[in-house]
Amino acid sequence: MKKKQFKAESKKLLDLMINSIYTHKEIFLRELISNASDAVDKLYFRSLTDDSVKLHKDDFCIRITPDKEARTLTISDNGVGMTAEELENNLGVIAKSGSQAFKRENADRQEDVEIIGQFGVGFYSAFMVSKKVQVLSKPFGSDEANLWESDGADGFTVSPAEKESFGTDIILYIADNTEEVSYDEFLDTYRLSALVKKYSNYIRYPIHMNVETSRPVEGKEGEYETVVEDRTLNSMIPLWKKNKSEITEEEYSAFYKEVYYDYEDPLRVIHSKTEGQATYNALLFIPSHAPFDYYTKEYEKGLQLYSKGVLITEKCADIVPDYFNFVRGLVDSEDLSLNISREVLQHDHQLKLIAKTIEKKIKSELVKMLRTDREKYEKFFEAFGTSIKFGVYSNYGIHKDELVDLLLFKSSHEEKYVTLAEYKERMKEGQPAIYYGSSDNIEKIKMMPQAETAADKGYEILYLTDYVDEFAIRTLMQFEEKPFVNICSADADFDSEEEKEKLKADNASFEEMFKLMKEALGESVQTVRFTHKLKKHPVCLSSEGVLSAEMEKVLNSMPGSNGVKAQLALEINEEHPIAEKLKSLYENDKDTLVKYAKLLYGEARLIGGMELEDPVTFAELVCELM
Ligand code: ADP
């Protein structure tokens, strides 16, 4: 019999398929089961419309039969089957959608292999695990069966054959083990069940397999016998396709924990059916806690993507924005094709539409949670708030307006979480700004001299303790027309106009003294001056430029930082006895004034929760001046 050649494109693909990397090989089973299911679908629909087809939905099934001795794995279905002509036409050329990806000129080979692994290209994937493939098929209503056979490389044959009933058997002659790859696993019932569960759990027809198990012999204690059990491997009805009203909270939780490997129930379930421009079912979960690798590079965001109940990809990253990277779950859409490649997917219009509506859904669900279940929302924010804040800050704040309502900060008002709207609502009349303090913990902020002054004025302070907080706040710049002001910045001005005038005059008359002190401190500060904003504290450091002292610390702790510096002013409480002391030193003992300047600067750093730049010199000065 003359061998027929594969079409050119199919040949190239076949070659790639055979050489595909090991971890991708397992998807062959998904592909073959999907084909079987499609074939069954076709016959099932005929049975609904054609009275001569006397078949009931329950008659249909798919069967997997591994044979370790013969080293074959057979996937059988009782679907429409194929004629000799169909065998030749359908299996002699690769599916159109799949081949699209391979038409690119100068295609990178490794990349192509990746595409196959990710999405598969139908029937050909059989060659990833087989040295020979046979397809024995008999169309429904025909007496003639045919056998298609190929060992991959150089073509295929089709010849008449015997087959008892209609449908198709795909017989894979599993490849011999190599040094790198053990193909034996594809003959193992345990492994095969797991693969069906992973990829084909929601196929609408039962997938059967005979599984050997041992069970205790009745009446004979301690004795076991091996029995063959006919098992259905798939659960068939996807949870997300059921109506919400039919699903209990326990079912959602059990599904979540099983599929996404969590030990804790999800905090929130979002289950939606969307129709219109994009038609899809989504089942999304907000976890109760951050996964252990959440804050590492290893963590990958993404949702599972299904097309008509068949898994296309385990993690589709493009479907959720980075700031919602904690959301787990899946999207099932009829609009997506199973054979879609990763690159096509990235630019897929339909997927973009889906992503947009998914984002809206997550946002509105979070807002709802914030309004109706504050306790849960705070738990959520404790776990994932950093992501939201990072979302505000990243990309030059392009998403800040969508995210601002989701923010929470602890504040001086009972040290509880507040939203910006709540803060604004409570603001004192005439309060010009939203004030915040920034440090790595609340206690340090509370001890800042400026915090005391703000409290005296009756101003609430936001406590910014997460490294990203101040960056996010700076990106926002203002909330409902109220600017954000760091209590430690020169802009945090709690004085009246008269007080300001008086202070200005005082500072002017001691200009020379401050110049001397500033020189003693070198680059550490920009200026030295009197202030009226401190109560009992003698000194403080205020930031003058865009960077606060806390931001300086964060930026400098990042890899590759090149030592940015906040511009600081050393401010001295004019009402404190130390002011008089400085004035008299300026008149009588300039050497000691210089030492005092250094000491006060160190003290200001300590009070502000910062580290001393030179603790040894500071300690020596303390002793010397005691
Ligand atoms: P696709 O499924 O994307 O069309 P495949 O290469 O997997 O691409 O299959 C090519 C064609 O072969 C299918 O469209 C179908 O017509 C036919 N086919 C494959 N498997 C079966 C089967 N088990 N029963 C009937 N027809 C099949």
Image (cartoon, rainbow, N blue to C red):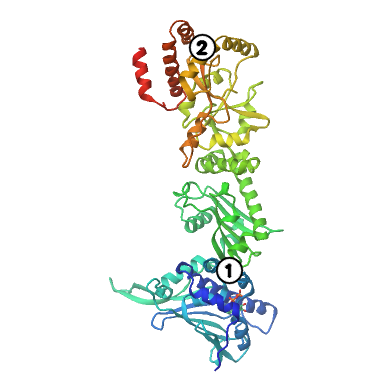
Is residue 408 in sight in this rendering?
A: no
Name the residue rendered at 67%, 56% in the picture.
353
Q: Would you name the residue on which mark 2 appears?
A: 513
Of the image marks 1 and 2, the number of the one nearer the N terminus = 1
> Ligand 1 sits in which quadrant?
bottom right
Total labels drawn: 2
Mark 1 is surrounded, within 10 Å at the Cα level, by few (under 14), some (14 to 19) or many (20 or more) other residues, namely few
Rendered-image quadrant of the C terminus: top left
Residue 197 x %, y %: 49, 67
Q: Say which of 240 and 52 sits in front.
A: 240
Is residue 542 in sight in this rendering?
A: yes
Label 2 sits on what residue type?
Met
Residue 373 x %, y %: 57, 40
Rendered-image quadrant of the N terminus: bottom right
Mark 1 or 2, closer to the camera = 2
Image quadrant in which you'd find residue 90: bottom right
Q: Would you name the residue on which mark 1 appears?
A: 107
Name the residue rendered at 58%, 70% in the picture.
204
Image quadrant in which you'd find residue 122: bottom right
Kindly indicate whether the residue at mark 2 contacts the one at mark 1 (C-beta within 8 angstroms): no
Image quadrant in which you'd find residue 424: top right
Vertical order, 260 against 198 (above or below)? above
Q: Secondary structure at mark 2?
A: helix
Vertical order, 373 against 575 (above or below)? below
Residue 590 x %, y %: 44, 10
Name the residue rendered at 49%, 15% in the picture.
516
